[in-house]
Image (cartoon, grey):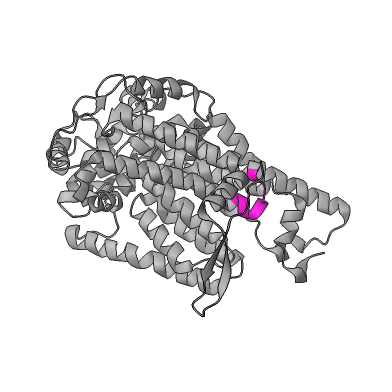
Amino acid sequence: MPVEREDVRVDDGAGERRDAGPAPVARAALFVRRHGWFVGLLAVGAALRVVAALGYRPALWFPDTYTYIVTVFKPRPDLVRPAGYSMFVKLLEPFHAFGVVAAVQHLLGLATGVLVYWAVLRRVRRGWAATLAAAPVLLDAYQIQLEHLLVSDTLFMFLVVLAVVLSLADRPSAVTIGLLLAAATLTRTVGQPLILLLVAWFLLRRQVRPAAVLLAAALVPVIAYGAWFYGTYQRVGIIGANGVFLYARTMSFADCARMDPPPDLRVLCDARPPEQRPPSQEYIWAKDAPLVALPGITFTEQTDDLAGRFATLAIRTQPLDYAASVLSELGRSFVWGRPVYPDQEIYDYYQFPTTSPGPPGRYAAQLGVDYSRHYERGPIGTAVVEPYAGWMRAYQDVARLPGAVLLAVLLVPPALAAGRRLHDRRAGAPPGRWREAGPAPWLLPWSTAIVLLVTPAAAAEFDYRYVLPAVPLAFLAAALACGNRKDFLNDIPRNVRL
């Protein structure tokens, strides 16, 4: 049904009356008519998040949560995780409600879907393509569950997607993008390579000055945090666990018989064959792990340096084994099912539970529990409320993005680009046209998604929650790559068009 225009006349300040355009109700109706499918999808996504909030009150907990909460009340850099998420939780402390933290994270998830939709619609001008691109982040049950967990991944995802979308604008603000990347890096350290990635993007677009500004804007907060870290621990960096995590990664293949490590490194060897060893994370947290058995805490400078030297030797001695191990971990992102990994305990944290989760088992988390009660000003256990919780469990059984579909989506942009180049070659187009036109818009979100998937597999290990921040970027890239030929040509400057 056509929307009637209801015009309003306003005084322009000079005694004249001018047309203010459609009234607010008419404008809203017009917006819904133009974006009806996406508005409906967004409404469904919001409703699912309301059901999750009603079913699991006030939020869901993860082992890392307690460390973040300690940092809220004892502001100092943590040796394992940067303090960005703790600062985010600190901003919401006046509400004294973890339910508010979870609600804001749900809003960030919805906002991420809006960003993807807007970015695709602006470039491709196809509402159905933009809606499909935004669907996974809005509807995936595991995405909704992750938003309800008190962990850093949802905040990190929003910051990265916003930075990428702003970078695709005609007149991007390099300062804003740099600050977003700094915030992402101080939320999760996997954000560090993204700074260089986006600098390279601007250089590919021949925007040298914005690239320099972006780099400076990103590095200043990171360096300031590094100075705070150094003042606390007299160590260079923003965390003190890089060597430990890389050591754990290499233990999936490290063979001391081939490495022949010096005596001080030999204490970190595992005599078991690689196929009989536990998942990598056990070499960081298990009490009987060689690293944990050393005197002192696991993340002292001496222990981290020892672990880093062992890992470096393992990679240098067995580079092909390391590459195979990384590919094996990365391959877990693309399986159709969702097998239990790295163990049942961690796997269960990503499921909507049937009963209220018990208290944390690790002693180090007890201080975080005490501080969490102070933050909430009351008990912090998760209440499982039916029937809402049951609805979300049933929804999670069927509504998820299989890894194989994510792989197919990631293959779409390079496949289409190769096909277009082949077509141009057969049509006799000048070979330098693609270089003159600059990088295709899909390349930035696609390469960002690849970095987000590969970095954990190379430096730590696969985890299901590490995959989800890459999903909206992968679908954004695929939608941009599927833009029709006419839209693509419209992005090419006139002086280099055929």
The image quadrant that residue 395 belongs to is top left
Which x, y percent locates residue 69? 20, 44
416 left or right of 231 in image: right
Say whether residue 446 is visible.
no
Q: Is residue 219 magenta?
A: no
Say whether residue 154 is visible.
yes
In depth, the one of 159 and 338 nearer the eye is 159
What is the span of residues highlighted in magenta in the rendered image?
120-127
Placement of the C terminus among the 4 image quadrants: bottom right
Residue at the image point whose x is 64% and y is 54% from the top:
123
Residue at the image point whose x is 27% and y is 19% from the top:
355
Return the residue found at the far bottom: 14
158 left or right of 375 in image: right
Mark count: 0
Which x, y percent locates residue 474? 56, 43
Identify whether 336 is placed above or below 413.
Answer: above
Residue at the image point whose x is 37% and y is 47% from the top:
155
Placement of the N terminus among the 4 image quadrants: top right
How would you classify the magenta stretch by its main secondary structure? helix
In depth, the one of 162 and 276 nearer the eye is 162
Which x, y percent locates residue 127? 64, 45
Which x, y percent locates residue 54? 32, 29
Residue at the image point whose x is 22% and y is 54% from the top:
77
The image quadrant that residue 9 belongs to is bottom right
Identify whether 73 is placed above or below 226.
Answer: above
In depth, the one of 12 and 319 nearer the eye is 12
Q: Is residue 126 magenta?
A: yes
